[in-house]
Image: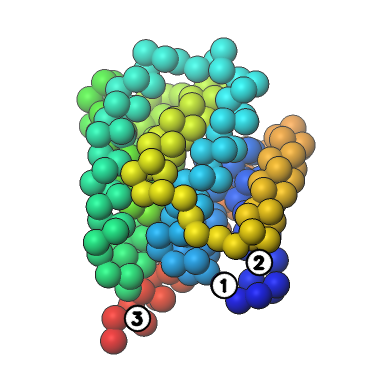
Amino acid sequence: MNGLTGELVLGCVVLLGAAVQRLAGIGFALVAAPVLVLMLGPHSGVSLSNLAAGAISAVGLAGSWRQVRPATMLPLLLAAVCTVPAGAWVAAEVPTPVLLIGIGLLVSAAALLVIRGARATALRGVGGALVAGATSGFMNSAAGVGGPAVSLYALNSGWTAREFVPNAQLYGAVVNVFSLAAKGLPELSRPAWGLVAVALAGGTVIGALLTTRVPERRARVVVLGLALAGGLTTLVKGFSGLG
């Protein structure tokens, strides 16, 4: 990340991701993680994505915790926590170009699966929660993108958007704490940290204001379109670095 311009771009990316996350319950990583990885490198980019998504989830949960389904979320959370260390190991040991390819593939595939509304009996009930949680925990720690697996589980379980958002916020708050514990905080300059904090706060406020003004379907299309573009860009960057 180079100078003031880079820091301003970083702030804009975090602002957009925060607004999306507050609006839809998930989405910070889908929108922001590919760009953050390209700007900061895989370690700091994914760690910043974990930190930001976890913080926004915690803020949203403060006002919606009464709507959480603890019994349903417990298998998801336990499975995710078990696979976080494996994702952290992959993120630390895999060469940067290969990791960029992996992140690009995961983001692109996740966006396409959610766009298509993939249906699978394996993603229902307690068994489905364990599969979704294990997949999500690994993806969250390795690539910063854990939301789509949980979103697909919710879709196959028949959850409404109103039911999904508070439970996704609980999931994001817990799993991102474990992901950061496994990998550590991102490496940023003091000005960058300040800009990230302001962008997170501003994006969260904007997202909260938009929740009553933007139709859910339209917001979903924008989020997934941005995610797919970011995933494909990261994929190209990874392949270009192999030589």
In the figure, is residue 145 to the left or right of 130?
right
Residue denoted by label 1: 1
Residue 30 in view of the camera: no
> Dot 1, how many residues are within 10 Å of its Cα: few (below 14), some (14-19), or many (20+)?
some
Residue denoted by label 3: 241
Q: Earlier in the sequence, mark 2 or mark 3?
A: 2
Residue lying at the far bottom in this picture: please name it: 243
Residue at image x 72%, y 49%?
Answer: 198
Residue at image x 45%, y 15%?
Answer: 69
> Which picture quadrant has residue 146?
top left
Residue lying at the far front in this picture: please name it: 190
User: Residue 222 got which mark?
Assistant: none
Q: Name the quarter where the C terminus is drawn.
A: bottom left
> Dot 3, how many residues are within 10 Å of its Cα: few (below 14), some (14-19), or many (20+)?
few
Q: CA distance from mark 2 to mark 1?
A: 7 Å
Residue 18 in view of the camera: yes
2 vs 3, front mark: 2
Confirm or deny contact between disc 2 and disc 1 (CB under 8 A): yes
What type is the residue that disc 1 sits on? Met
> x%, y% of residue 147?
43, 41
Q: Earlier in the sequence, mark 1 or mark 3?
A: 1
What kind of element bears circle 3? loop
Residue denoted by label 2: 7
1 vs 3, front mark: 1
Residue at image x 50%, y 17%?
Answer: 68
Q: In the figure, 60 relative to 97: above or below? A: above
